[in-house]
Image: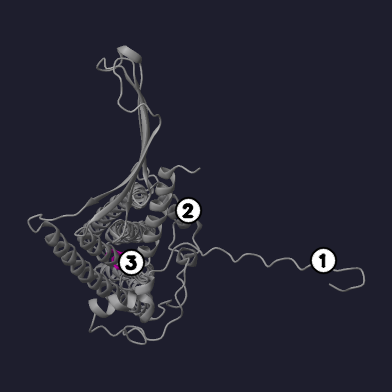
Amino acid sequence: MACPYFSLRRRLLATGLAITVAAGCALKAPPDTAAIKTEALPTLQPPVQWAAFGAADPLVDGWLATFRDEQLTAAVVEAIAHNADLRVGASRVEQARLHAKLAGAKLWPSVDLLARGGGKLSGDGSGIQGGVLSANWELDLWGRVRYGRAASAAQAAAAAADFIYARESIAALVAKSWFLATELGLQAEAARDTIRANEELVRLADDRARIGVGNLADVYAQRASVGGYRDALRELDFGRAQAIRALELLLGRYPSAAAVISPRLPAFPGEIPAGLPSELLERRPDVIAAERRVAVAFNRIHEAKAARLPRIALTTGVSAISSDLFVLQDHDNPVWSVGANLLAPLFTGGALKTQVEIRTAEQEQAIAEYAVVGLRAFGEVEAALAAEIAAREREQILAAALADNEQALTIAQTQFKVGSNDLRLVEERQIALSGARSALIRMQAEQRIQRVNLHLALGGSFELPPPPPPPPPPPPSTRDGTR
């Protein structure tokens, strides 16, 4: 014959499980991407093509490989593995994931065991010994626990998206720092060329003064120019060392300015991979993180609303207790028990209602922050596109100006050697050439920096997507050729 306690317990647990499963279908889904965009950006209408560029090639992932620089790629990989800020971000993602796991644990029954032993000399000398095994299960009728779990899961997803954006930002910062250090190296190399050219002018001026067709004023003026160029070179060397130190910090190394940097800027990638404006908000990890925070706030609102309703919990337990000093009233062991608890908030001074209002205000803030991030994303893409186009056009202008200045300096030097002009004109041409060369180097580095900015603004990944799986092998053929 079945024990009536066991029968009643099974019925109560089955009823509670059925109620919980039925209530599980009642959770409201947070607003989707389209609804959030409509509420956060009601006047924003993404154009068919970008205003600064127009039609563009599809977005390209794996942008790091487009520069075809193995040293740069190795530096980015090292930074992703050892950057201290990324390690902090990874720990935050893990914490958010564990908080989501912890929130989900409340959906399961809690089981506790209390045991006592030792005979007459145990504890307070009562001689009581035995154990109690109890279980408590809150029936999540209104979804309070499940809304809390959904909020924690959305928070974990937001943290993961933030971490992805941080990784992309670190990769972009390493690339831009690499280009800056390389540019400063090229600027220093150009300054050394200028110094050598001016030292040759000093020698010519000294020769002219010695044979009587020049004067010492030209010699001293040219030596002063050489001193100025040497000072500029020293400043460039210092700037390059500082840039390399900053890069080493990103790589997680000691900042000793000892990292080996490419001596030349990498090849410039091809066409601008801008993609479509309508796809931007679905690509950018920071926008996705902002969207997940709206979901967090939405679930917190319903969690707070459910907290205003009664809580029901099933309880059950089994105990076996004996005493060497006292005669217990109930000698039956073990003793089974089953029951239920009801906790209903009757008066809290408006605290629960205020909590709902706070969560509602947090959702309004999350939607407003989504609007800020979304608008910033479009602005960054348009700015990066315009900057790259301007840099490309300026490079062409500066390249032509550099060629003209080289020709002008050659003519001035020839005229100076034959005595048809003075050293002042040669020096002017040299200054113009040095400025044109420096501007061209700066613009070439700027082009590459703006391309990286564009990829980051578009939400493109620096990592190549995984290759597709190989096709399955064909089935073996039979001897007669049939399959």
Say if residue 480 shows up in the picture.
yes
**Sooner in the amino-acid sequence: mark 1 or mark 3:** 3
Task: Residue 74: give its label.
Answer: 2
Q: CA distance from mark 2 to mark 3?
A: 48 Å
Reading the image, the residue beneath label 3 is: 27
Q: Could you tell me which residue is drawn at 46 percent across and 80 percent down?
A: 57
Q: Are marks 1 and 3 in contact (CB under 8 Å)?
A: no
Q: Nearer the viewer, mark 1 or mark 2?
A: 1
**Is residue 286 in the magenta section?**
yes
Along the horizontal axis of the image, is 210 left or right of 273?
left
Task: Residue 349: give its label.
Answer: none
- Residue 271, image quadrant: bottom left
Q: CA distance from mark 1 to mark 2?
A: 44 Å
Q: Are marks 2 and 3 in contact (CB under 8 Å)?
A: no
Q: CA distance from mark 1 to mark 3?
A: 51 Å
Q: Position of residue 388 (x, y in %)?
A: 35, 75
- Residue situated in front as seen by the camera: 179 or 451: 451
What kind of element bears circle 1? Answer: loop
- Residue situated in front as seen by the camera: 96 or 145: 145
- Residue situated in front as seen by the camera: 376 or 358: 358
